[in-house]
Image: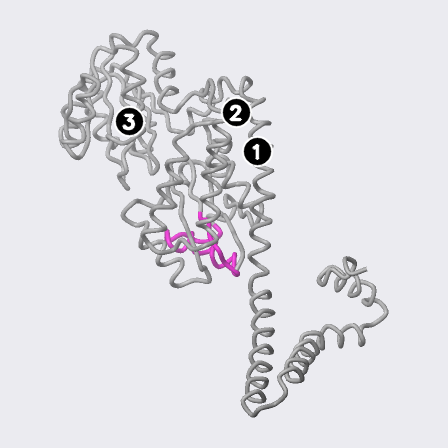
Amino acid sequence: MELLAFGINYQTAPIDVREQVVFSDDSMEDALHDLVGHHAVKEAAIVSTCNRTEIYCSTDKPEEAKNWLASFHQLQVRELEPYLYSLPREHAVKHAFRVASGLDSMVLGEPQILGQLKNAVKSAELAGTLGLLLHKLFQRTFFVAKEVRTSTEIGANSVSMAAAATQLAERIFGDISAQRVLLIGAGEMIELCAGSFSARHPKSITVANRTAEHAQALANRFNAKSITLNELPEQLALHDIVVTCTASPLPILGKGMMERAIKKRKHRPIFMVDLAVPRDVEQEVLELDDVFLYTVDDLSDIVQEGLDSRQGAVVQAEAIINSNVINFMHWLESRELVPTIRALRSQAEHYRRHELERALKLLARGGDSEKIMESLSNSLTNKLLHSPSDVLNHASSDERDELVDMVNRLYQLDRLE
């Protein structure tokens, strides 16, 4: 079994591909059980966010594991293959470290991905698919992420997706103090958006969510109004800025609903940001003249602002990561020797017990104890050294020198001189 990381992210696949392989919270446990229970995978953890879907696993059949991702989502392998990356062994380790440290994010240095990774590990633990290898990998991953964030300025001057949405709104409206803002959802991203827009003092903020209690709780923090999703058709036309990010598997804002809202607004434009994957807004809404719709991918230019000031931190972070990759691979390679070491010890124990039992029987018969102990030690030594001596005696000229060097190292013969 070898360590493997594979998946797609915002760099390799557009949003219309990424949203097809999202794992919801409700499907995560079933997915993990299916992958580990019915395929050549011993351990697995799944990271699924708006910008990436990645599987970290232990497998001896990487192609079968990768094909599973497509089949689970009822896709053809050829549909997903152009966007898929596959990272074995140390490349998987380095990737995990970079992701957790925010070096592989659309928003360089953003902290949310670390929490998302921890949630993925928690899901794998609950599903029983996190074994020794992945447990060790993620423990080290979280350690590295903490070291990077503590020792470098990787998060300095970073622009979050929430801040990017706010900045884009300001570029379109100039001053948003006269605008009404509608935030749909009540998760971490909408919470960040609420904080970012609230700081600009818009005319009003409304939070819409499927669960009224969650909407009200978030609204109370930002002096906002709360509504349920059922009220959206009537409320939508009252707002100039709409930012949505829910976990709905299907769009909640369709073309028809938006057409009716625009008609009520007498064709005054609506600025919309859809941060959800899968998307909350039907793609056909882009066809409407009075709607300015942006997805998470459209914000990439804004979130890269301030990147130059963080390049020095990136170099420092990469150095920390590379050092820790070497350490982790040393641990991993030592673990791969465990079966051989265990077999060697088992064989030696077998010889020891056999000779001990033989000696005890002779002692019980009244034999000379000194001679019996001498015989035991000679027999045990001969058995332990028989195989390596035999291999050396029958070695070809091509391999003899290498074997001699290896035996000298194994038995540290140079220290006896």
In primary-sequence order, the first of circles 2 and 1 is: 2
Residue 60 is inside the magenta segment: yes
Which amino acid does the dot numbered 3 rest on? Ile
Which residue lies at the image location 54% right of the left edge and 56% below the top edge? 2
Query: Which residue lies under the disc numbered 2?
Result: 152
Which residue lies at the image location 47% right of the left edge and 19% below the top edge? 156
**Looking at this rendering, what residue extends furthest in the bottom direction?**
365
Task: Name above or below for residue 216 compared with residue 414.
Answer: above
Q: Badge 2: how crowded within 10 Å, few (<14), some, or many (20+)?
A: some
Q: Which mark is residue 76?
A: none
Left or right of 336 in this view: 241: left
Which residue lies at the image location 58% right of the left edge and 44% below the top edge? 327
Could you tell me residue 271's position as x and y percent? Answer: 30, 19
Residue closest to the eye, 162 or 404 = 404
Which amino acid does the dot numbered 2 rest on? Thr
In primary-sequence order, the first of circles 1 and 3 is: 3
Q: Badge 1: how crowded within 10 Å, few (<14), some, or many (20+)?
A: some
Could you tell me residue 1's position as x and y percent? Answer: 52, 60
Could you tell me residue 358's position as x and y percent? Answer: 58, 86
**Which type of secondary structure does the marked residue at label 2 adopt?**
loop
Which residue lies at the image location 61% right of the left edge and 43% below the top edge? 326
Mark 2 and 1 residues: CB-CB less than 8 Å, in contact?
Answer: yes
Mark 1 and 3 residues: CB-CB less than 8 Å, in contact?
Answer: no
**Which type of secondary structure does the marked residue at label 3 adopt?**
helix
Left or right of 40 in this view: 387: right
Query: Which residue lies under the disc numbered 3?
Result: 190
Q: Which mark is residue 320?
A: 1
Region in magenta: 55-78
Q: Badge 3: how crowded within 10 Å, few (<14), some, or many (20+)?
A: many
Which amino acid does the dot numbered 1 rest on? Ile
